[in-house]
Image (cartoon, grey):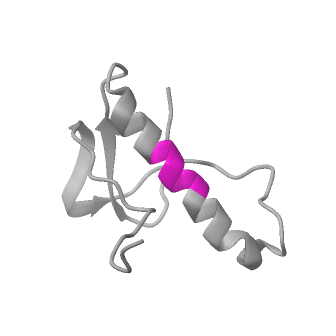
Amino acid sequence: MNQNTNLTKVIVPCKFSFLHCWEPDSVNGGDPKYSVSAIIDKSDTKTITEIKAAIEQAKKESVSKWGGKVPNNLKTPLRD
């Protein structure tokens, strides 16, 4: 495998919603943060599969940080 390959990054063709990239926004009085929601077409199964594979790779790489097992309440970036 190529050393420059990063299996946890995926280029996603999508539309943005709730875009806060020019200045941070505060949610419910919390610290202001930059954020965006990316909307991916459900019929784009290739991209969704790539994202799921990247999530699994990130879990594998982070297991040592969590004491040897993935937390049960781990939130992933995909929502339906």
Above or below residue 53? Residue 22 is below
Image mark count: 0
Spot the residue most to the left.
Answer: 22
Q: In the picture, which quadrant includes the N terminus?
A: bottom left
Give the vertical position of 58 relative to 18 (above or below): below
Q: Does residue 24 appear in the picture of this structure? A: yes
Between 72 and 31, the one nearer to me in the picture: 72
Q: Is 30 situated left or right of 43 in this image?
A: right
Depicted 66 relative to depicted 29: above or below: below
Identity of the residue furthest to the top in this view:
43
Image x and y of residue 20, in percent: 24, 53
Let me know if residue 77 appears in the view: no
Residue 26 in the image: x percent, y percent?
39, 57
Left or right, 6 with reference to 17: right
Residue positioned 39% across, 69% down in the render: 6
Task: Name the residue located 31 percent from the left edge and 40 percent from the top edge.
Answer: 38
Q: Quadrant of residue 61?
A: bottom right
Counting from the top left corner in percent of width and height, residue 55 is at: 54, 53
Residue 69 is covered by the magenta coloring: no
Where's residue 70, x and y in %? 77, 60
Residue at 36 percent across and 75 percent down: it is 2
Left or right of 29? Residue 38 is left
Secondary structure that dominates the magenta span: helix
Tell me where the magenta segment starts and ends, as one range.
51-56
Q: Residue at x 49, y 61 (%)?
A: 30
